[in-house]
Image: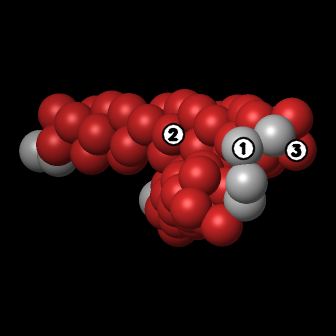
Amino acid sequence: MQDMFKQFRSGAIFFAVGLTMVYLANTALLPSLRQELVTLAGLILAGAGFVVAMLAQIRMIISRFLRFLRKP
């Protein structure tokens, strides 16, 4: 269970960092190719973090459900 929570935490951190990159790129950088590339990198990072966090959440739910079914 602790490994799944670490995976969830890592995914949530990547998601937050990706969204922060998108926000900062759109507010701090002038419109340019660089801004678009930083925004793209942020979106990729946020998307990957979201997928990792959701997979960990699904694993935790399934684990809890199976533990509930196995209890006498």
> 2 or 14, which is in the foreground?
14
Q: Residue at x 72, y 59 (%)?
A: 29
Work out whether residue 12 can be spotted: yes
Q: Position of residue 70 (x, y in %)?
A: 23, 38
Say left or right for 30 vs 61.
right
In this figure, which residue is indicated by the disc labeled 2?
50
Vertical position of residue 55 compared to residue 18: above or below: above
In this figure, which residue is indicated by the disc labeled 3?
34
Vertical position of residue 54 compared to residue 28: above or below: above
Please tell me which of labels 2 and 1 falls first in the chain. 1
> 55 or 41, which is in the foreground?
41
Nearer to us of marks 2 and 1 is: 1
Amino acid under disc 3: Arg
> 12 or 39, which is in the foreground?
39
In this figure, which residue is indicated by the disc labeled 1?
31
Q: Residue at x 51, y 40 (%)?
A: 50
Query: Residue placed farthest to the right in the image?
Result: 34
Name the colouring of the figure.
secondary structure
Say left or right for 70 vs 41.
left
Q: Position of residue 8 (x, y in %)?
A: 51, 55
